[in-house]
Image (spheres, coloured by chain):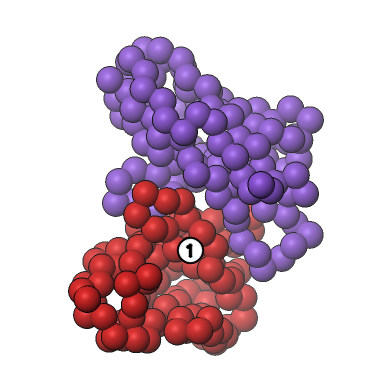
Chain colours: A red, B purple
Amino acid sequence: GQQVMQIPQYQHVQEGEDFTTYCNSSTTLSNIQWYKQRPGGHPVFLIQLVKSGEVKKQKRLTFQFGEAKKNSSLHITATQTTDVGTYFCAGTNDYKLSFGAGTTVTVRA
Amino acid sequence: DTGVSQDPRHKITKRGQNVTFRCDPISEHNRLYWYRQTLGQGPEFLTYFQNEAQLEKSRLLSDRFSAERPKGSFSTLEIQRTEQGDSAMYLCASSSTLQGGYGYTFGSGTRLTVV
């Protein structure tokens, strides 16, 4: 079955620095979605990427879908304490999302 | 509040007991999903409804688990003869086939502890 893997599992970032988290699928995806889960909270939808090579930006967050539609990345610039949480990518080939294990981000002030 | 509601928020039960959770999705959403999440892991798919029809159930789910969505509105997830390994956060989510690109809306979850 479809497997989605994320690296790194943990990301410790100094406030103000940039970082990137990566997502890889064992199969070609129809689309990929990104979610953020704050500590003690539930996953909240951030964005969906559909087209090969697509790049979307949300303020300091940049999302990219690979040319082969098997990988994706999330880049955060000038990290803030509000960026703390776990970021999940989730791939789908139809209606069902398969989530990665997430990248848990902590920020040093 | 037009979000996804789940009840109860927390449930502690003794091993062997049956438990039932409820999910009220966003009313305009025709798809409803149940996921399970354990510490340090991403949500794991359990089952999926489109309107009142249950279209897929995870092969990881034993026969002790059953879900319903009568009339295509709210949904219930029942676990019979609970085991300690069932302890997890049970998340419900909904989405609409008519609103592409908006992802799933998750509820706050029901945290189950089996003692």
Q: Determine the residue positioned at 51% across, 59% down.
A: A44
Residue A89: image quadrant is bottom left
Q: Nearer the viewer, residue A66 or B98?
A: B98
Q: Determine the residue positioned at 46% across, 51% down.
A: A42
**In the image, residue A68 lies at what x, y percent?**
51, 81
Residue A73 in view (yes/no): no
User: Mark 1 sits on what residue?
Assistant: A35
Q: Determine the residue positioned at 39% across, 58% down.
A: A38
Instruction: Tell me the amino acid under the disc marked 1.
Output: Tyr
Q: Determine the residue positioned at 53% across, 68% down.
A: A46
Q: Which of B23 and B15 is in front in this view?
A: B23
**In the image, residue B44 lies at what x, y percent?**
44, 46
Q: Using the image, name the chain to which the residue with label 1 belongs.
A: A
Residue B115 lies, with reference to residue A80, above or below; the image says above
**In the image, residue A70 lies at what x, y percent?**
47, 74
Q: Locate residue A85 relative to residue A29 in the image: left or right.
A: left
Q: Nearer the viewer, residue B115 or A2?
A: B115
**In the image, residue A62 lies at what x, y percent?**
47, 84
Q: Which of A80 and A20 is in front in this view?
A: A80
Quick one: SS at disc 1? strand
